[in-house]
Image: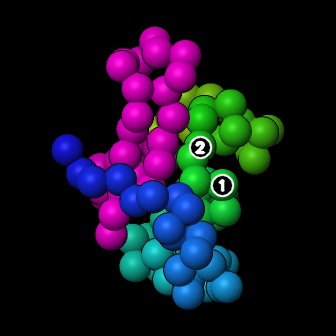
Amino acid sequence: MSRVLNPRAYKDSTLSSKPSSRRDVLVKQHGLNDRQAKALGHLIQHGKLTIQDFEALCPTVNRRSLQRDLKGMLDKKLIVEVGAGATDPNRHYVLAEL
């Protein structure tokens, strides 16, 4: 299992002064789409993301499409899933230690 980056330590780092530039670099490096870029920005700013958070960021997009976007980020090892399984109501995503 990948190690999880402490959101507080991440915010306190020098990268926190320019979270959008860090996001932009990661988006370009990993070829993320616009929705995935929004999710990454949310993760950098807040430290975690739920599917409900993602739906609020992209209200016109079908939940299944958002789930596919998250799966793509998981496959690229940008994020880590935290929770007991697909039906866990506390399941959320955090940044992987890059």
Query: Which residue of the protein is positioned furthest toward the left in this rendering?
Result: 1
Decide which of 4, 65 is in the foreground and name it: 4
Q: Secondary structure at mark 1?
A: helix
Considering depth in this image, is 87 or 72 the residue closer to the camera? 87
Q: Quadrant of the C terminus?
A: bottom left
Give the vertical position of 32 relative to 94 (above or below): below
Q: Which mark is residue 97?
A: none
Left or right of 97 in this view: 95:
right
What are the residue bounds of the magenta stretch?
A: 69-98
The residue wearing badge 1 is 46
Q: Quadrant of the N terminus?
A: top left
Residue 28, compared with residue 74, is above or below; it is below
Would residue 22 be seen by someone viewing this image from the given angle?
no
User: Residue 56: x percent and y percent?
Assistant: 78, 39
Q: Secondary structure at mark 2?
A: loop
Residue wearing tag 2? 49
Identify the residue shown where x is 53% and y is 22%.
Answer: 90
Q: Position of residue 96 (x, y in %)?
A: 36, 57
Which residue appears farthest toward the top when viewing the image? 87
Instruction: Please tell me which residue is depicted at 40% across the width and 34% down the height of the picture.
Output: 82
Q: Amino acid at mark 1?
A: His
Question: Which residue is at the front of the view, 7 or 40?
Answer: 7
Q: For the residue marked with disc 2, what is the amino acid? A: Leu
Inspect the magenta stretch and tell me whether residue 78 lies in it.
yes
Crowdedness of circle 1 by 10 Å Cα count: few (<14), some, many (20+)?
few
Q: Nearer the viewer, mark 2 or mark 1?
A: 1
Q: Is residue 9 above or below residue 73?
A: below
Contact? badges 2 and 1 (CB < 8 Å): yes
Q: Is residue 68 left or right of residue 77?
A: right
Q: Please provide percent x and percent y for residue 9.
A: 50, 68
Q: Could you tell me if residue 8 is visible in this image?
A: yes
